[in-house]
Amino acid sequence: MDRQKISAIAHGDHPIAAPLHDTSVDRLLTRALPRGDERVLDLGCGEAAWLVRAASGRPGVRGDGVDVSEAALTRGWSWVEEAGLSGRVDLHLADAAGFSAPEPYDLVMCVGATHAFGGLLPTLEAAGQKLAEGGSVLIGDGFWEREPGAATLEVGFSADEFADLATTVDRVTEAGWVPAYAHVSTLAEWDDYEWSWTGTLARWALDHPEDPDAKEAAAAAVQHRTEWLRGYRGTLGFVTMVLRRAE
């Protein structure tokens, strides 16, 4: 079963593809969009949930989203049209790292998709190249809540994949960025996200027994749930930051 199809199904009940409750998303966007008329770019936009939330209720906001998943963008277009944002939000099937636009953006977002650029700092460098003067970056990435043990490493993480929160912020500031706001996802947000991811995929498999991908979807839900509960729950954290360039 194609990994992009798995992801598209699994995020059906939690379109924000990160461990964040709706109130956290709204608070972050309020800080990142103070004027309400910004041009926004979402790198690795998935189903365009962040863009839809950014533009809804802010009639001056216009945005572009970029992702390599055709399935996610197809669902994203339906969200855009349902929200009445056609003409203000545009989605592009393209590699986020190679996307270029004729004008810079007031806000560049990349939440949970820094792997597309090779990590947090390379993502910030790429985002900065697309940022207008005085603009902000909204970026979300992992960090270690505690030192990863054998169980976490056995499910595919490496010890140097992330740092602790303080070191993560130090690296960001040393790269020339100033945190204007940030949100650290709570365990409740993580649990809601992971139960949604695994539960939605498992339910789809149960509801579509005739689909040739049903057994693989069910197995993927079990594997993910096991890796989360026995591997990284309480160890892997997630921080979403609103950053501006240092003067």
Image (cartoon, helix red, strand yellow):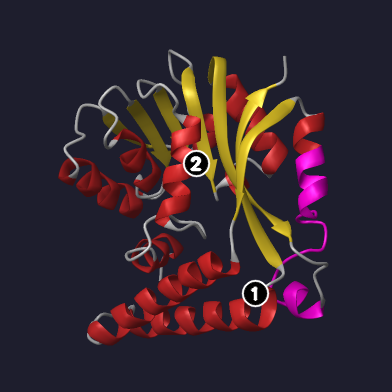
Q: Earlier in the sequence, mark 1 or mark 2?
A: 2
Q: Secondary structure at mark 2?
A: helix
Q: Which residue is mark 1?
A: 233
Dot 1 and dot 2 residues touching (CB under 8 Å): no
Residue flagged by tag 1: what amino acid is it? Arg
Q: Is residue 237 above or below residue 216?
A: above
Figure quadrant of residue 247: top right
The residue that appears at 72% across and 69% down in the rendered structure is 235
The residue that appears at 39% across and 79% down in the rendered structure is 199
Figure quadrant of residue 29: top left
Q: Position of residue 176 (x, y in %)?
A: 76, 25
Q: Which residue is mark 2?
A: 28
Crowding around mark 2 (Cα neighbors within 10 Å: few <14, some 14 to 19, many 20+) is some
Tell me, yes or no, if residue 68 can be seen here: no
Q: For residue 151: magenta?
A: yes
Q: Position of residue 80 (x, y in %)?
A: 23, 41
Tag of residue 46: none
Crowding around mark 1 (Cα neighbors within 10 Å: few <14, some 14 to 19, many 20+) is some
Of 128 and 60, the residue lying toward us: 60
Q: For residue 91: magenta?
A: no
- The segment highlighted magenta reads 150-170
Q: Quadrant of the N terminus?
A: bottom left
Residue flagged by tag 2: what amino acid is it? Leu
Of 209 and 21, the residue lying toward us: 21
Q: Position of residue 81 (x, y in %)?
A: 17, 42
